[in-house]
Image: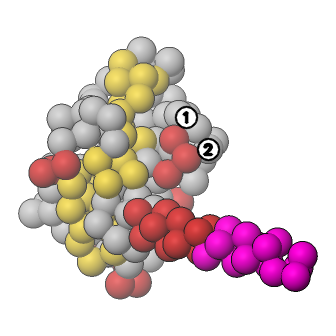
């Protein structure tokens, strides 16, 4: 009889953890996009997964990504910010400006204010802006979803 109580408690905990995992999993399937302060640029910028800086490509028009069309190797250096679910507006982000378009290889690429978003492979994981103003084509975004045309390290 003593084993019934611990077994019942274990089943409740496992059931509870399973339900919690399902809720967390579905809530976290969308990439969180938020605004943080960049020490390098001395202003707020848009970041996504794990605080990685996101960029826009000025040749992207009408909200469509062109990186892979410009150069098939482009997505290796400038990977798309993707999201399995709807992107999630974090601090400083206007959720109405978030969207998703079909990116390179059929990916679900996140957009902000109609700009497809990219990471730069030359950035570290948190807040680097090494791709800022790269080739005069790649720019970090402001919280309003506009290019920050401030001079950067020039990749």
The number of numbered badges drawn on the structure is 2
Residue shown at 58%/38% (left/top)? 126
Whether the residues at callouts 2 and 1 have beta carbons within 8 Å, the answer is yes
Is residue 49 visible to the viewer in this orientation of the structure?
yes
Q: Main secondary structure of the magenta part?
A: helix
Left or right: 96 in relation to 44: left
The residue that mark 1 highlights is 128
Residue range highlighted in magenta: 1-15
Q: CA distance from mark 2 to mark 1?
A: 7 Å
Quadrant in which the N terminus appears = bottom right
Residue shown at 50%/18% (left/top)? 39
Front residue (pair 95, 3)? 3
Q: Position of residue 68 (x, y in %)?
A: 37, 73
What label does residue 33 carry, if any? none
Q: Position of residue 14 (x, y in %)?
A: 68, 74
Examine the structure image and report whether residue 12 is included in the region drawn in magenta: yes
Residue shown at 45%/67% (left/top)? 23
Crowding at label 2, few (<14), some or many (≥20) Cα neighbours within 10 Å?
A: few
Residue shown at 51%/44% (left/top)? 52
Is residue 115 visible to the viewer in this orientation of the structure?
no
Q: Position of residue 106 (x, y in %)?
A: 35, 84
Crowding at label 1, few (<14), some or many (≥20) Cα neighbours within 10 Å?
A: many
Image position of 97 with respect to 83: above or below = above
Judged from the image, the secondary structure of the residue bearing numbered disc 2 is: loop
Examine the structure image and report whether residue 34 is included in the region drawn in magenta: no
The residue that mark 2 highlights is 125
Judged from the image, the secondary structure of the residue bearing numbered disc 1 is: loop
Q: Quadrant of residue 28?
A: bottom left
């Amino acid at each position: 009889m003593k084993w019934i109580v611990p077994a019942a408690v274990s089943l409740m905990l496992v059931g509870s953890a399973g339900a919690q995992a399902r809720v967390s999993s579905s809530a976290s399937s969308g990439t969180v996009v938020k605004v943080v302060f960049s020490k390098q640029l001395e202003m707020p910028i848009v970041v996504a997964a794990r605080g990685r800086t996101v960029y826009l490509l000025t040749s992207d028009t009408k909200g469509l990504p062109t990186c892979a069309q410009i150069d098939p190797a482009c997505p290796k250096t400038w990977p798309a910010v993707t999201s399995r679910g709807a992107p999630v507006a974090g601090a400083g982000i206007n959720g109405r400006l978030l969207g998703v378009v079909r990116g390179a290889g059929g990916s679900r690429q996140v957009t902000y204010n109609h700009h497809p978003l990219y990471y730069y492979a030359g950035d570290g994981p948190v807040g680097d802006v090494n791709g800022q103003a790269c080739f005069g084509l790649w720019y970090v975004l402001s919280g309003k979803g506009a290019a920050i045309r401030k001079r950067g390290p020039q990749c």
